Amino acid sequence: MAAARSVGMEAEVAALRGRFAAGGTRGAEWRAAQLRGILRMAAEAEAEIALVKSSCKFALKNLKKWMKPQKVTAPLMTFPSTARVAAEPLGVVLIISAWNYPFLLSIDPIIGAIAAGNAVVLKPSEVAPATSSLLAELLPRYVDGSCIKVVEGGVAETTTLLEQKWDKIFYTGNGKVGRIVMASAAKHLTPVVLELGGKCPVVVDSNVNLHVTAKRIAAGKWGCNNGQACISPDFIITTKSFAPKLLEALEKVLEKFYGRDPLRSSDLSRIVNSNHFNRLKKLMDDENVSDKIVFGGQRDEHQLKIAPTIFMDVPLDSGIMKEEIFGPLLPIITVDKIHESFALINSMTKALAAYLFTKDSKLQEQYEAAISAGGMLVNDTAVHLTNQYLPFGGVGESGMGAYHGRFSFEAFSHKKAVLVRRFAGEAAARYPPYSPAKLKIL
Ligand code: NAD
């Protein structure tokens, strides 16, 4: 079975390679036609459409500009010459996406791959099976199916895909599988983009606009898939004296957003499946943290719902502070002075996003200088991802490479150095035999 699958996959990739080699994906017209197809498809799909549309429109608007070789200086050494950096497509690329925004995380990288002129295979997440089959059904109706394919499946199918030779692998998901992807890619010297996760810290200073801060933390945490988002606030650090005020503000906002019985709110997302529900239950029921719950805690296994739950001062070596939470649980860690948050954050692996709420510009500067993270956002959560002019990606354990806007185009392009000389401009000193006079010039 696995062997047959492998042979089938090899043939599919060879066909794509043939289409790519024949120039099927290179022209600006082909690229624009596919992007317009995706735009039409987005109108039919149900979720995460706004971001896909804006990504696609942005790529269509800028395509010609991005494709244009960039002239660079040609130094005296090579006079007379012209020099440019030409973006060329990499070839046939594999995109493996995750379940939590299954449409966006599939289509957004495809937009970059197409804009850059590549043939693409998409492997959507099997954990969101409805979207996976929707993509498999919809995409070929709107784009060139001979150059852009969807392969559905789980670990077995992904393993077979990873055995093939690709010109780039773009993976979104957890770091454990990220390591598997990178090891497979190494066999063919294939470059990778790894869009991973981590624990995104939120530092809250005591001088903030409390109501706005609470609303924006709640929106980024519970408003985005009930915490099942890669840039979801993972934990808060604030001062001991300010923590009760922040907690009270969060409680008020949460009650306003989701009512007194949040499990009955239709605005609160479910946990994706019982595996993840049980994983979160285990984090909550850990005997070292269960008595630290200061808000929420309700859950309903039948509905796969967990209410927004806040913990105060859980031990730093507990599971909830060691692993990415990826759910509606939010620990608050208190420190005496806000600057102590820096050392705490730096003792952990680098996050995909680091947040800070403050009116103090000095603290802002210090935070920016001291904390390494994929992205940084001051006085809000999550919205930095909507800015097409900012790269979106991780650093260290939160991943490598980035995309969005021009960065997506670049992630799927090779920057080819092109130098064009003329036959004039010969320098005798360049060629042997080397006399002492020539060597002086060299
Ligand atoms: P997932 O379970 O959907 O897995 C992601 C992909 O990996 C799927 O397509 C799956 O088929 C494949 N996969 C799973 N096991 C595999 C294996 N053994 N070998 C090969 N492929 C395998 O998603 P997940 O990992 O649960 O996603 C959640 C994680 O992703 C979190 O850590 C989150 O922070 C991160 N994430 C990051 C971003 C980002 O843009 N940086 C976005 C969303 C999620």
Image (cartoon, rainbow, N blue to C red):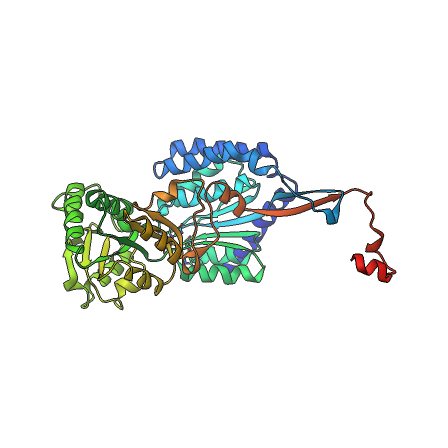
Residue nearest the viewer, comparing 216 with 3:
216
Counting from the top left corner in percent of width and height, residue 307 is at 18, 51
Counting from the top left corner in percent of width and height, residue 131 is at 37, 43
Q: Is residue 34 left or right of residue 367?
A: right
Q: Is residue 388 visible?
A: yes
Q: Is residue 85 left or right of residue 95?
A: right
Q: Which corner quadrant of the image does residue 71 belong to?
A: top right
For the point 57% across and 62% down, which residue is it?
187
Q: Which corner quadrant of the image does residue 27 belong to?
A: top right
Q: Which corner quadrant of the image does residue 243 belong to?
A: bottom left
Q: Is residue 160 left or right of residue 47?
A: right
Q: From this viewpoint, which residue is outermost toward the left?
A: 260
For the point 36% across and 47% down, which residue is it?
129
Residue nearest the viewer, comparing 432 with 292:
432
Q: Where does the C terminus fall, quadrant-wise?
A: bottom right
Instruction: Please determine whether, in this image, residue 319 is positioned above or below residue 142.
Output: below
Q: Is residue 301 visible?
A: no
Image quadrant of ligand 1 equals bottom left
Residue nearest the viewer, comparing 173 with 336:
336
Instruction: Please determine whether, in this image, residue 238 is positioned above or below residue 414.
Output: below
Q: Is residue 423 left or right of residue 103?
A: right
Please count the marks in the image. 0
Counting from the top left corner in percent of width and height, residue 329 is at 23, 55
